[in-house]
Image (spheres, rainbow, N blue to C red):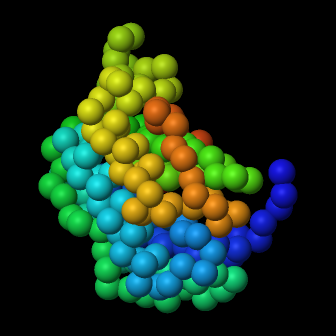
């Protein structure tokens, strides 16, 4: 597989707050994508994802800021175009420290690269033996919100790309995993 510089394709990055922790998520567009198309498509698809998962997200979920970098640029410029806001369905106070740092990752491929889009804090029932996410994976067939999000990610209108600048195709499942770096902070009492 060929190596590509991180700035080979344009990027849209949105920052958000979930369960009191700030996170960011990035989408990519094809090489040469205009700033307006990059920002519009990135905000739309991220808005679709969180809207489809709103009942699993904490009540304090909020988009904070967004920025973008064009093809072959390392300069990120601020934009006022944020993904659509939602009202989460899970009281933040009911989330354990480990639930607050659990990530749901949509995985796909483009021609020459892997693609990942991660949203933190959907409240999966990982403790129950038959709970969603207890295997570390949730199939699109198990949750309508995941199926709808994957449909949005694969919609050609959004033109989501890998680092190689070619169109991405997302698989019909998400990975559910605790973030190891944040878990170390929880264990040391630095996050909780």
> Does 158 sit left or right of 115 as displayed?
left
The image position of residue 106, as x and y in percent, is 48, 44
The image position of residue 134, as x and y in percent, is 43, 20
The image position of residue 162, as x and y in percent, is 62, 59
- For the view shown, which residue lies furthest in the top direction? 129
Residue 161 sits in quarter: bottom right
Residue 121 sits in quarter: top left
In-front residue for pair 130/48: 48
Task: Report the residue at 43% width, 78% height from top.
Answer: 37
92 up-or-down from 132: above or below: below
Task: Report the residue at 29% width, 55% height from top.
Answer: 48
126 up-or-down from 173: above or below: above
The image position of residue 76, as x and y in percent, is 55, 85
Task: Report the residue at 37% width, 44% height from top.
Answer: 151
In-front residue for pair 104/90: 104
In-front residue for pair 78/37: 37
Task: Report the residue at 61% width, 88% height from top.
Answer: 75
């Amino acid at each position: 597989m060929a190596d590509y510089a991180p700035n080979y394709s344009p990027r849209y990055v949105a920052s958000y707050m979930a369960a009191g922790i700030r996170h960011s998520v990035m989408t990519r567009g094809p090489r040469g994508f205009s700033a307006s198309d990059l920002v519009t498509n990135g905000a739309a698809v991220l808005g679709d994802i969180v809207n489809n998962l709103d009942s699993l997200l904490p009540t304090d979920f909020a988009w904070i800021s967004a920025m973008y970098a064009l093809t072959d640029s390392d300069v990120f410029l601020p934009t006022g175009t944020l993904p659509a806001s939602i009202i989460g369905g899970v009281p933040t106070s009911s989330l354990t420290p480990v639930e607050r740092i659990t990530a749901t990752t949509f995985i796909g491929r483009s021609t020459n690269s892997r693609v990942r889009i991660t949203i933190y804090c959907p409240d999966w029932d990982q403790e129950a033996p038959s709970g969603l996410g207890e295997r570390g994976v949730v199939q699109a067939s198990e949750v309508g919100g995941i199926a709808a999000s994957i449909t949005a990610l694969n919609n050609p209108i959004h033109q989501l790309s890998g680092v190689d600048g070619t169109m991405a195709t997302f698989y019909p499942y998400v990975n559910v995993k605790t973030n190891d770096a944040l878990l170390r902070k929880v264990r040391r009492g630095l996050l909780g």
